[in-house]
Image (cartoon, grey):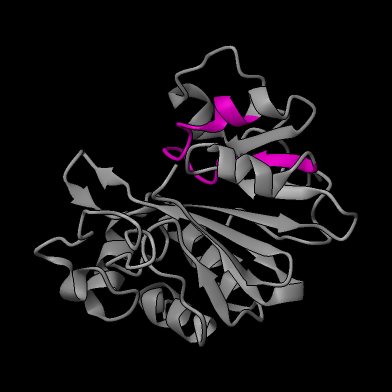
Amino acid sequence: MADIVIREVTDNVWTFSRPFALFGWIHVGGRSTAVRLSDGGVFVVASTPLSPETKTKLDDSVQYIVGINAVHNIYLSEFKKAYPDAKLLAPAAALARVDDKSLVFDGAWGRDPPDTKYGFEDDNKDVAFFHAKSSTLIEADLVVNLPGKEQYSKSSMAGQFPFYGPFGKPYGWIQQKFAAAQVADKDAMRRDAKTVAGFNFTRIIPCHGDVIEKDGNVVWKEAYKLHLEES
């Protein structure tokens, strides 16, 4: 897949970035992220195709395949077929939306008891995954950083959209309003936003847009300011 950009962002953390257009015309880019865990296995957030280049980089050490939110489920089936012994995990909402109904999920956040342990908790925390060793937060759509220059760097498409500007940035009042508008359970979002804000991360790897390499915790607190300021 000639348009994919594979990069070791920091020790034992790799990104797989490529073009992706929402609804076929909104160029937001896509990204999978893989982490080599302390036991040598690989934890992969599967949000892009399992290209030959991706498979070569991941080798045969994949232990966990993760659909990071309800809609990032397109490629779970091909990852599971390639790594049948890996545990497949996703939010409960993804189970009904995935096209391949034959998939068996080993764990589902929101379905399983809240204290369920899946085996990677010493390395990563929560569905907005905190990899403590590299001070990295891995998430899907909670924070975006558009345009995705890296994701389109090997593509003939520009990866631009007329309204990016402040709309695509992870901070400022537009991101704050957008984050607030998407919340169904304000109490849960306030609780979880505070939990993430308490993690000691400097980097944010989103699925859409460029990696935020520094001041990630500051960016998160600004993006979720409206929730964090609520009593």
State the residue in front, 227 or 137: 137
Q: Is residue 157 left or right of residue 130?
A: left
| Up/down of 18 relative to 173, above or below | above
State the residue in front, 183 or 169: 169
Is residue 215 visible in the rendered image? The answer is yes
Residue under the image location 84 percent in, 61 percent down: 122
Residue 77 lies in magenta, yes or no?
yes
Residue 28 rendering spot, x and y as whole percentages: 29, 55
Residue under the image location 70 percent in, 58 percent down: 35
Residue 23 rendering spot, x and y as whole percentages: 21, 39
Image quadrant for the N terminus? top left
Is residue 231 visible in the rendered image? The answer is no
State the residue in front, 196 or 37: 37
Residue under the image location 48 percent in, 37 percent down: 49
Residue 173 lies in magenta, yes or no?
no
| Up/down of 222 relative to 123, above or below | below
Q: Over which residues does the magenta segment extend?
A: 61-79
Q: Is residue 5 left or right of residue 80?
A: left
State the residue in front, 51 or 221: 51
Residue under the image location 35 percent in, 76 percent down: 226
Residue 177 rendering spot, x and y as whole percentages: 25, 68
| Up/down of 110 relative to 202, above or below | above
Which residue, as the protein is rendered here, is positioned at the far left?
162
Which residue, as the protein is rendered here, is positioned at the far front?
2
